[in-house]
Image (spheres, grey):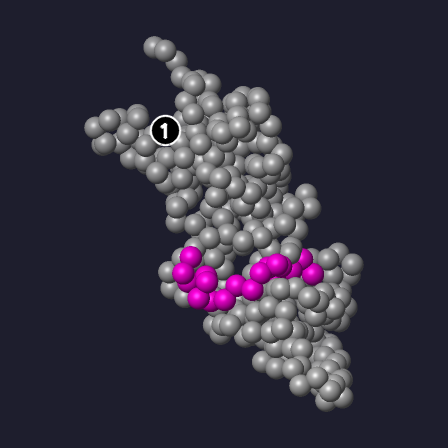
Amino acid sequence: MKIISKTLKLLAVFLLMASVTACSDDDSSNSSQITTVVDIALQNNLTSLAAALQATDLVTTLQGEGPFTVFAPSNAAFAQLLNATGLDLNNLSSEEEDLVRNILLNHVIIGSTITSSSLISSGSGYANTAAVGPNGENLSLYYTTTTGVMINGMSTVTNADYLASNGVLHIVDTVIDLPTIATFATTNPALSNLVSALQLADSGSPTVPYISTVSNAEAGPFTVFAPSNEAFAALLLELDPSGNTTLADLDPATVDAVLTYHIVGANVQSDELSTGTVATIGGNITADTSNFTLTDPNGRVSNIITSLVDIQSMNGVVHVIDRVILPLQSED
């Protein structure tokens, strides 16, 4: 009740702000009124979003020139967040204010007005939000349109295309949490074999544990060269041309050894990758930035898929590759 009471007090400030804005518009002699994404939020009774923007000093930001694409959580979505975290928007510590601000910015794409039709026509993909990770890089957002527009596998657009003078607003049913490497691995079906490999490696004794590590926002940072599903399928045929071997048939310890050659213990964006030796946690591989390839100790070449690089999370960055990297193989 304390959270609700204090939030309602803060909402009153926003209602006052709305009335001031309306008066200002009435006084204007210009018949074409400027309606920002903040105005659109208020017009659609997104009072909890308005309160959160006020508490984190983001109102002026989203009243700026933009353009912005805003995925705006409903009041019910904010209520769920506040109940789960115990956050009090009217009494945030400096650390809590930074966290809430970054969460809000994780709902904002700056520099473009992306309508639902644009999202649906592209099917799925990544975009950079205004939120930042510990390294200062902008966090990524993954959208898919298989069953409506879904963000990061957790938040669905319920009402779309509220156009403003400085962008567009889409209402979503869940607050979009700050992503981890696990967020992007588990939400993109093209990386499902990678998730299975991580789970298989975890099943060994002792456990690694990969899944809990990549799910931990405070772990890392890591750079993951993530093999696509096709890369894992090609590896299985490479190991057994008969096609009778599945990923589940592999030894967990062997899979663990392979995965270590895909992980670097630092956050390395694509423009920070240098030609030469790359020290993974399993051993050295070689990068060639002139053609964006990685070569493993066996001379096998993996292409970095340039359209799927710099997928940034709180605990690291993912670059998708088209061939699985292997440790040095015995000639026996």
Q: Residue at x 56, y 64 (%)?
A: 113
- Of residue 120 and residue 142, the one placed in the foreground of this image is 120
| Residue 330 sits in quarter | top left
Q: Residue at x 43, y 29 (%)?
A: 302
- Asked if one can make out residue 201 in the rendered structure from this viewpoint, the answer is no
Give the vertical position of 46 relative to 224 (above or below): below
x, y percent for residue 185: 47, 46
Residue 218, position as x, y percentages in the image: 64, 45
Q: Secondary structure at mark 1?
A: loop
Read off the magenta span: 101-122
Q: Residue furthest top?
A: 332
Q: For the C terminus, which image quadrant?
A: top left
Report the side of 67 relative to 117 (left or right).
right
Residue 188 drawn at (x, y percent): 43, 50
Residue 175 picture quarter: bottom right
* Residue tagged 1: 251
